[in-house]
Image (tube, grey):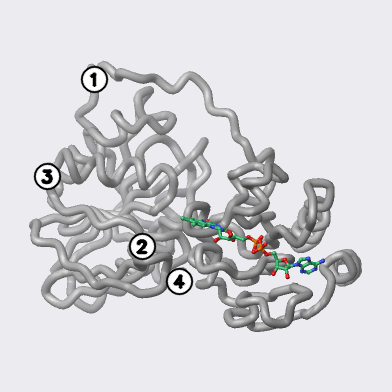
Amino acid sequence: MPNIAVFIEQRSGSLKKVAWQMISEARKITDAHGGEVWAVLLGEAADAAAEAGKYGAHKLFTAGGDNLATYNSEAYGAALANFCKSNNPDLLMVGSTAMGKDLGPKVAAKLECGCISDAVGLTFDGGFEFRRPVFAGKCFVDLTSSSAMTVVGIRPNAFMLNEVGAAATAEAFDAGIDGLELKAVVKSVEAATGGKVELTEAEAVVSGGRGIKGPENYQLIEKLAEALGAAAGASRAVVDAGWVDYSHQVGQTGKTVGPNLYIAAGISGAIQHLAGMSSSKCIVAINKDANAPIFKVADYGVVADLFEVLPVLTDEVGKLKS
Ligand SMILES: Cc1cc2nc3c(=O)[nH]c(=O)nc-3n(C[C@H](O)[C@H](O)[C@H](O)COP(=O)(O)OP(=O)(O)OC[C@H]3O[C@@H](n4cnc5c(N)ncnc54)[C@H](O)[C@@H]3O)c2cc1C
């Protein structure tokens, strides 16, 4: 009967989709084997209980206060570790996001328990087994943890959303951090994305590679992305060249995306790029080289010059939308 705690990531009150994906998967396990799914929210966010319940959480545990208003790894790490000490979940799931990658190992270190990062699969058969990609996604390893409790980081979009329930019962818990003297304090947060769609949350992504030839042409990617309501991504060649900011990089050393639609324009399909996008549901590749490796993973391939295809595609999408 495993009890599974799921960390609900919020930034400025906005909740991350990966939390609902983790709850959906956790609920499948507790439905089959007993136990409960506990969503854990630090800081304030409206609708968290309704949303967490919708995807299958039995309870939502919340803690607020000044130290938890914005993410601070020391305060959040202590609060989450204290939650686990008081409630003894068998598993704590955190998203493999920038926040989760910082937080998960910190909590595991405080609890002196096992920590598995970047998992894409989770099964339970008396104990948990975790699957994670290695060698840039060329193969997978299945891992178990020998500690009573384990912290696992889950890649965004590794699991499907599944709506099951009603609102979860909400319960405040004592995070045990009153009087904690933080060594670093977050004074303000300045969002870099400027209202554009966040890559790891996006339902559709349009990415440009070295084939766009220069920074002045990245607007072709942005225009198609805007027409589709998609996020704009890039290969490492493009960000290394300084044509667009590093936050757009998709791949092994960039962001991992798994949207319903991924359009790769002028991207060759190096293994390190595929590591960040090959789990996308539908991949469309536009490349003038018919032998480009990207076509091996593409559902639809357009062998053509991106400078001819992208403006036409953007126009057609615009017409359909209007
Ligand atoms: C440790 C390590 C980590 C890495 N991490 C990442 C990562 O996270 N993400 C990542 O992307 N890469 C990563 N790389 C780099 C990766 O190996 C490739 O070098 C990179 O992905 C290539 O980018 P690209 O496909 O844009 O460029 P290229 O490989 O140069 O491909 C450009 C493509 O554009 C096509 N093209 C050119 N002109 C046109 C046109 N007019 N119309 C249509 N198509 C055109 C060409 O046919 C070609 O296929 C990593 C490498 C290493 C060693």
The CA span between labels 3 and 2 is: 24 Å
Label 3 vs label 1, nearer the camera = 3
Secondary-structure class at tag 3: loop
- Residue 96 lies, with reference to residue 26, above or below; the image says above
What residue is pinned by disc 2? Answer: 23
- Residue 99 lies, with reference to residue 281, above or below; the image says above
Residue at 60%, 34% (x, y): give it: 191
| For marks 3 and 2 on the same chain, the one whose residue lies earlier in the sequence | 2
Answer yes or no: do the residues labelled 1 and 2 have beta carbons within 8 Å?
Answer: no
Q: Amino acid at mark 2?
A: Ile
Label 2 vs label 4, nearer the camera = 4
The CA span between labels 2 and 4 is: 10 Å
Secondary-structure class at tag 1: loop
Q: Splitting the image into four quadrants, where does ligand 1 fall? A: bottom right
Answer yes or no: do the residues labelled 3 and 1 have beta carbons within 8 Å?
Answer: no
- Between 258 and 287, the residue placed more toward the observer is 287
| For marks 4 and 3 on the same chain, the one whose residue lies earlier in the sequence | 3
What residue is pinned by disc 4? Answer: 160
Relative to 71, 27 lies left or right? left
| For marks 1 and 4 on the same chain, the one whose residue lies earlier in the sequence | 4
What residue is pinned by disc 1? Answer: 180
The CA span between labels 1 and 4 is: 38 Å
| For marks 1 and 2 on the same chain, the one whose residue lies earlier in the sequence | 2
The CA span between labels 3 and 1 is: 21 Å
Q: Residues within 10 Å of mark 3 (few under 14, many from 20)?
A: few
Q: Amino acid at mark 3?
A: Glu
Q: Is mark 1 within 8 Å of ligand 1?
A: no
Q: Is mark 2 within 8 Å of ligand 1?
A: no
What residue is pinned by disc 3? Answer: 112
